[in-house]
Amino acid sequence: MVVEEIIATVIPGLNTRVVDSVDQLEKIEPSHVDLVVSDLVLPNSQPAEVIELVSKRFASSLRIFFTALDDMKIEQQVANSGGLLLSKSQHYRELMVKIQSFLKRDAVNLDSFAQRNEFQSLIQMPGMPKPLTIKQAQIMEQVSLGRTGKEIAKMLGMSPDTVNAHIKEAFGRLGVQNRGEAVSNYSVARKLAARLHGEEALAHLQPNVD
């Protein structure tokens, strides 16, 4: 599920099939699949057999294998097949680095923590060039909780017009046109930031109120 989540974040809309058994694998039409994600421990099959079957049947598809096994022969076989091997013991950030490199995409800015300035938050929608500012992130945090512009303005000691201006700018940085889409994308970006940097790194989302 974590691998699926990362792939969906890096390439939204990619046609992905997750394989749970060899029987399922053999029923899938190869021409309809862009990417196969397969555990190497499938019922009634050895890891080497799974690698060979997936690699032959889906020769034109991208292939990612994941396992808890620590076996140099398996690593070499996957490498020779042109696939990517992921370990279930790897942290989210490590998985993101490997998957983005394998898919040749850099939708997620993995250096956002080091690159941000004093005004920037860690909330950045994948594929968008700029993160939310801290103020935009604080406001979107409240929007995501269902608070109105007037309620947020009172909480933060701003005018409603200023709050609305921040929300409008946040829409652009989240790549959306309306509040519903903004909340959805903000939730995705927030979850991603927590995964990559830890929930404690998002303390800046809490507004400074007197």
Image (cartoon, rainbow, N blue to C red):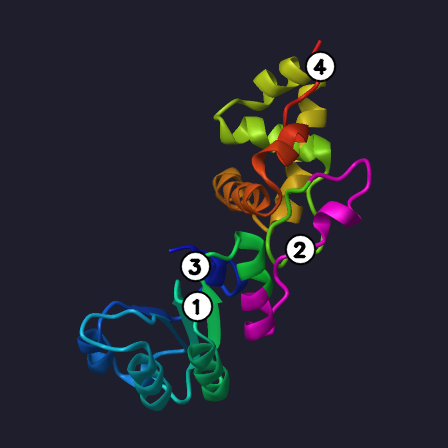
Q: Is residue 170 left or right of residue 75?
A: right
* Farthest-out residue, top: 210
Q: Secondary structure at mark 1?
A: loop
Quadrant into which the C terminus falls: top right
Residue type (three-letter) at the residue carrying disc 2: Leu
Q: Which residue is mark 3?
A: 88
- Circle 3 crowding by C-alpha within 10 Å: few under 14, some 14–19, many from 20: some
- Of residues 43 and 186, the one nearer the viewer is 43
Q: Position of residue 41 (x, y in %)?
A: 29, 69
Q: Between disc 4 and disc 1, whose residue precedes?
A: 1
CB atoms at circles 2 and 4 under 8 Å apart?
no
Residue type (three-letter) at the residue carrying disc 4: Gly
Which residue range is magenta in the image? 98-121
Q: Position of residue 117 (x, y in %)?
A: 82, 41
Front label number (1 vs 2): 1
Residue type (three-letter) at the residue carrying disc 1: Asp
Q: Which mark is residue 110?
A: 2
CB atoms at circles 1 and 2 under 8 Å apart?
no
Q: Which mark is residue 157?
A: 4
Residue type (three-letter) at the residue carrying disc 3: Lys
Q: CA distance from mark 4 to mark 3?
A: 46 Å
